[in-house]
Amino acid sequence: MFALTARRRLALYCTTTVTSPSPALNSLRQTATITTSAESPATEPKPATVEHGTNGKRSRPLTREQEQFLDSALRVNQTGELAAVLIYSAQTPPIVKAHPHLRPLMKHMYDQEAGHFTYFNHIIAKHRIRPTAMYPIWQVAATALGWSTAVMGREAAMACTEAVETEIGEHYNAQVRELLAWIKDMEDRGEEVGEELTELVRRIRTIRDEELEHLDHAVEHDAKEAKPYELLTGVIRGGCRAAIWLSEKV
């Protein structure tokens, strides 16, 4: 429902300010151009509840279809963040050994992914959402992908990040737009949206922006110089789409 077409290319741009968490990441303190193959976050609708917040509780339960959408979406989100943590864990030792100056960047991206994973673990446990049955397979696959691309070299590792974050950016963009559409409909009907739903949208927006920041860092560090770039990124993106589809269903 929220996976976008695989044929969209890197075409639309928006700008965000990337703030480094520590002095070790001074090189990351810049205005980065976020590149995404989904629609620009700048064009998202902005329901008043999301922009200004609410202290109320939702005045009407979600429909069964909405609950199913959220169960599927959050299950995939948790799985995707697990994969990201394992990819960066496997990539970091060989990349940092060969390119010590990349240690702050790799740690920065890993730390953000670990935070995303912790958040979605909390959410699916709170709402008793079943994790995907493919969990053990994705653990092995993500570790293998991270290690193999790192061994191929810095450019291949960054191409892996570019490919994965492109698919994740599309995934989160579509998810955010779906949730914003729900909130807008609720507001139009005069219903109280509720803090839990608005906070979920805000958190997914933030996570989406951090994932797209990683995409930019990958491009800045020569992802497109990987050999063979088109084949490598095409295979990884195809694998990501398959993993998303399977995790939604299984």
Image (cartoon, rainbow, N blue to C red):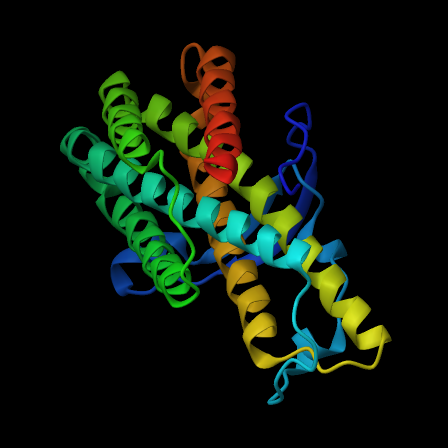
Q: Residue furthest front?
A: 64
Say above or below: 146 vs 88: above
Say above or below: 173 vs 119: above
The percent position of residue 189, horizontal first and vertical second, equals 85, 76
Q: Residue at x 67, y 82 (%)?
A: 52
Q: Residue furthest bottom?
A: 55
The percent position of residue 76, horizontal first and vertical second, equals 47, 44
| Horizontal arrangement in the rendering, residue 220 relative to residue 23 (left or right) | right
Name the image quarter holding the N terminus.
top right
Q: Residue at x 66, y 67 (%)?
A: 62
Q: Quadrant of residue 195?
A: bottom right
Q: Quadrant of residue 152?
A: top left
Name the image quarter holding the C terminus.
top left
| Horizontal arrangement in the rendering, residue 126 relative to residue 163 (left or right) | left
Q: Nearer the viewer, residue 52 or 108?
A: 52
Q: Residue at x 78, y 68 (%)?
A: 184
Q: Count the marks: how many?
A: 0
Q: Residue at x 22, y 44 (%)?
A: 103
